[in-house]
Amino acid sequence: MSENIAIFKPEKYVTGQSMCMEDYHFIIFHSKPPKAIVNGNIYSFRKGSLISLEPGACITVLVNEKNNTCKYIAISVKKEFINRLGLESFGIETLKFYRFENKYCNYLLDAINNFENEILVYGNGPSLMLESLEIQLAILLIRNSLSDNIYLDKNNELYDDYIKESIVYMHKYYSGNITIGDICREIYLSSSHFKRIFKSKTGKTPYRFLTEVRIEKAKEMLKDKKRPIHEVARLCGFVNQGNMSTIFKKHIGISPSEFRKNHI
């Protein structure tokens, strides 16, 4: 347990009791779990799945007379902490998961082990290492819980799979110094072919599309007046504050500071 994250590895399920979550709650099943009621509906979850529950969710594990033993990991993350990361990393002000049951990557298990080892060896006192592991673990939980479809608008059924993959990639990694070459390597297309089909399908160049993604994320973050503009620029993938101001004004018609004044 750290300041923002708690990990539990119970030996048996608590059955027949309703538990309501105050924070975000994640469960990784390493064995087949009993059925559970989540927000009034009965679910049968699979072994090897990640269950993602938002604050306010209520879950009741049903009695399983055959076997009450279990093998799973439960992770609780403070909602203020994870929502801040959701905004900074994905441009989403309040995280909403569109399905309970998700798949997870092996990196998530590695992050859990690294987090546990850090606390077991060095304790849970304030440290840059523990803070960085908290952030890594929480971001991986978010990534594995969000559907890629949240990045695709209703017109994207016209796009082929390559374009959809590139749009998802831009939305996920806009905060980094990604290039068109990075996107092409991800979707296994040549740069010239990708640029041509992207423009034909979306009406925009990949660079313009990525720039617009960054601007939309910046607009959301600028509404938080406590966040410095230079920090917004960094979190949204711009070179610096001046670079963001120039691009922002070109696309929106006003500077980031003017936008902030108009939306406070």
Image (cartoon, helix red, strand yellow):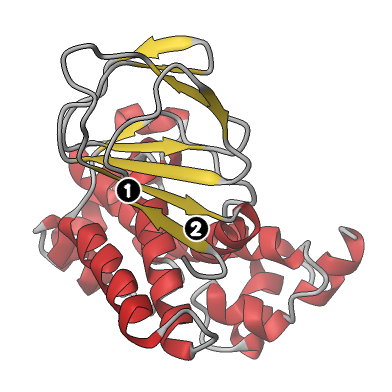
Q: Report whether 18 appears left or right of 220.
A: left
Residue drawn 31% across and 70% down? 116
Tell me residue 132's x, y (percent): 43, 80
Can you see residue 255?
no
The residue that label 1 is drawn on is 144
Residue drawn 31% across and 57% down? 169
The image quadrant of residue 210 is bottom left
Q: Report whether 32 appears left or right of 177.
A: left
- Residue 5 circle label: none
Q: Which residue type does callout 1 highlight?
A: Asn
- Decide: few, some or many residues near mark 2? Use Cα within 10 Å; few <14, some 14-19, many ≥20: many
Relative height, residue 253 to residue 201 (above, below): below
Residue drawn 15% across and 34% down? 31
The image quadrant of residue 58 is top right
Residue drawn 27% across and 70% down? 180
Can you see residue 97?
yes
Q: Secondary structure at mark 1?
A: helix
Relative height, residue 248 to residue 171 (above, below): below
The residue closer to the viewer here, 211 or 173, is 173
Q: Secondary structure at mark 2?
A: helix
Q: CA distance from mark 2 to mark 1?
A: 13 Å
Q: N-terminal of the two: label 2 or label 1? A: 2
The residue that label 2 is drawn on is 90
The residue closer to the viewer here, 31 or 14, is 14
Tell me residue 144's x, y (percent): 32, 48
Tell me residue 44's x, y (percent): 27, 16
Q: Which residue type does callout 2 highlight?
A: Phe
The quadrant of the picture occupied by the C terminus is: bottom right
- Decide: few, some or many residues near mark 1? Use Cα within 10 Å; few <14, some 14-19, many ≥20: some
